[in-house]
Image (cartoon, rainbow, N blue to C red):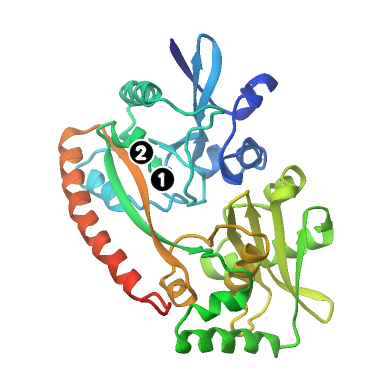
Amino acid sequence: MYQHRFITGLAALTDSERASLSGESPFSSLNWLEALELSGCVGEETGWLPYHLSVYDNGALIALLPGYIKLHSYGEYVFDWAWAEAYERHQLAYYPKWICAIPFTPVVGSRILSSQPVPGALYDYITAALHEAAGQQRWSGWHINFPTHCSGWQSQSLMERIGVQFHWKNHGYTQFDDFLNAMTSRKRKTIKKERKTVACQALTIRWYQGAEISDEIRQAFYQCYAITYLKRSGHQGYLNETFFQRIFDTMASQVAIVCAIEHDKIVAASLYLHDQNTLYGRYWGALQSHAHLHFELCYYQGIEYAIRHGLARFDAGAQGEHKLARGFEPLITYSYHHICHPDFALAIRDYLTREQAHMAVYRSQCEASLPFKDQ
């Protein structure tokens, strides 16, 4: 028989409970999620209040949903600002809301941490528990962002929202030239020209993994990341230096950094994570501008790495139609939503139905724009 409780930090888990949980990607691991908490990247000051749903079977922890009470919609990548504005126009409070997500990281994966397959009855129980909590705590609703597409969420009468990301797929390539040869001549020449431009700038490109990532390299990466974020957004990024130090220490076997070096100094860097099947490119920065260096460190080097290590997929982050010309294919992503206010729920459901039709057309247009010979 299932029971549940909400916990306000992963420190509340015992060692045996930690051992009973597993996530399918680096981002849903307890190491990643706890690094966010211990570094202060999530918490009251950032408007991401940890409120994880833990589910038990006869007293034993069997599942955990990483969840947060949100006081805003920053860092989610499933955009509901228009919903919040509509609430405000009607003198209603959209915040707080509860969200199950990986903060600041729009990566697709199971949102339920468990060492066992999740039965349909557990989805039913989780849905009922969240409905109850939303009513008791006066959340405007609750949301599941970027879960693996599965019948478990689809069967819960939640509102389904779709989006599009661009992921690179390894179609049996053994080297980068195999990938290029699958492209049309014009697109292949463009990529070769971009890479040649980088090669002519007297930059050394080098990968560092695990124990090779020294304190000096960590600091250089973070300096590049923070400066780039500051120029682009006016602040130094959602993730601080303490967070990165923790994941370098606790997840070393899954972390790699590719750097551009000029006169023995790191001038740009991109951080990657990986699991058995997928390479994830997420954080990049540069101290100065170099033509096409972003494409080299964030896309082409990642593709080469995935081919070299026999990885099936390369997720280079959200958005970016410019990825299409570089061989990244459109992928439908999903989120699931429950809105407590019945009138707003009806209006949002209608909006999502129309949005889904638009996104389906958009994905087809993206597929037609792929640079491969058979397109």
* Residue positioned 27% across, 48% down in the render: 83
**Residue type pointed to by label 2:** Tyr
- Seen in the picture, residue 71 relative to 283 is either above or below; the reply is above
Q: Residues within 10 Å of mark 2 (few under 14, many from 20)?
A: some
* Residue positioned 34% across, 69% down in the render: 367
- Seen in the picture, residue 2 relative to 99 is either above or below; the reply is above
**Residue type pointed to by label 1:** His
* Residue positioned 64% across, 72% down in the render: 175
For marks 1 and 2 on the same chain, the one whose residue lies earlier in the sequence: 1
- Say which element carries label 2: loop
Q: Is residue 236 left or right of residue 184?
A: right
Number of marks drawn: 2
Residue 139 x %, y %: 34, 31
Query: Can you say which quadrant of the picture contains the C terminus?
Result: bottom left
In this orientation, which residue lies closer to the viewer: 92 or 61? 61
- Seen in the picture, residue 293 relative to 158 is either above or below; the reply is below
Q: Is residue 281 left or right of residue 107?
A: right
Q: Is residue 272 left or right of residue 56?
A: right
In this orientation, which residue lies closer to the viewer: 8 or 52? 52
Query: Can you say which quadrant of the picture contains the N terminus?
Result: top left
Q: Which residue is mark 1?
A: 72
How far apart in space, not on screen, are marks 1 and 2 (Cα)?
7 Å
Residue 279 x %, y %: 60, 57
Q: Which mark is residue 95?
A: 2
* Residue positioned 41% across, 71% down in the render: 321
Q: Residues within 10 Å of mark 1 (few under 14, many from 20)?
A: some
- Say which element carries label 1: loop
Asked if disc 1 and disc 2 are in contact, CB closer than 8 Å, the reply is yes
Residue 76 x %, y %: 44, 49
Residue 132 x %, y %: 33, 20
